[in-house]
Image: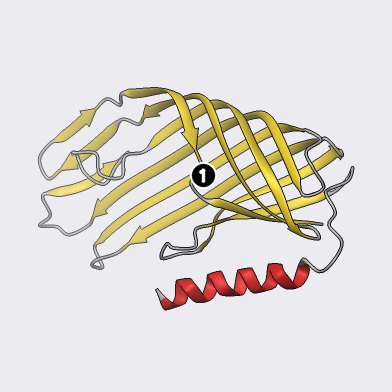
Amino acid sequence: MKKQLLVVMLVVTSLTVFSQEDRKKPEAKSFTAEVNLNPFSSSPININYLRFRYFTSETSAVRIGFSVGAQKQTPSQELTRQTFEFNIRPGYEWHLAGTERLSPFFGVEADFAIKTSSYEDQDVDAFLKKVTGAWSESGTERAFTRFGLNAIIGADFYVAKRVYIGTEFGFGFQSTNFSNIEATYSSDKVKIKGGSDLQVGPNFNSSIRLGFVF
């Protein structure tokens, strides 16, 4: 908790100092970069997901967000579990007049993500030798491919010169196709076909977006 409060205090102090300068919203050819801010979580500043925007004019911007994650576990020399996940979200925004500090906007955003998973045990006495598409036959860390599309609405509030915080929510769909699971045992092989999941409805980013204009 002390670390979380310290991060919040540092952010607030920095914004207070910067706020003495003139406010300025992005102009044409401006570039922004932002991270997710979760003041009261164990990781207050989340750099696992980054978003960038390029303003083609004062009222419109191309945006792209992405995240990359990988995990490798080796509980023993013979056993290895691995995952890799990649997500990219391109989109476009139209900004409204707002006020000197507030910049409301609406737009569209696509969502594409993939995840791969594998398990391998080279121990000669192991019953489960290898799994692709997950870490187990039951589907732990299941691999998938996802595609989605959202209509979004949000706002940026410029607390200082070239520094803003923002929030947004949207409505759209996500279609997820789960990978087949192939498990190799000491004396048998099992294949489980992947299914799918379709979700339609509202979605909300609970994090505060902290961004900077370059």
Quarter the N terminus occupies: bottom left
Q: Please report the residue visible at 68 percent of the width from the left and 29 percent of the height from the top.
A: 107
Vertical relation: 176 (above or below) 162? above
Indicate the amino acid at tag 1: Phe
Image quadrant in which you'd find residue 60: top right
Q: Nearer the viewer, residue 18 or 114?
A: 18
Q: Is residue 33 left or right of residue 134?
A: right
Image quadrant in which you'd find residue 72: bottom left
Q: Please report the residue visible at 71 percent of the width from the left and 37 percent of the height from the top.
A: 104
Q: Nearer the viewer, residue 71 or 26?
A: 26
Residue 45: give x, y in percent of width and height: 54, 63
Q: Is residue 76 left or right of residue 115?
A: left
Residue 170: give x, y in percent of width and height: 55, 30
Residue 26: give x, y in percent of width and height: 83, 48
Vertical relation: 59 (above or below) 49? above
Tell me the SS state at disc 1: strand
Q: Please report the residue visible at 63 percent of the width from the left and 32 percent of the height from the top.
A: 153
> Which residue lies under the disc numbered 1?
86
Vertical relation: 75 (above or below) 50? below
Mark 1 crowdedness (10 Å alpha carbons): few <14, some 14-19, many ≥20: some
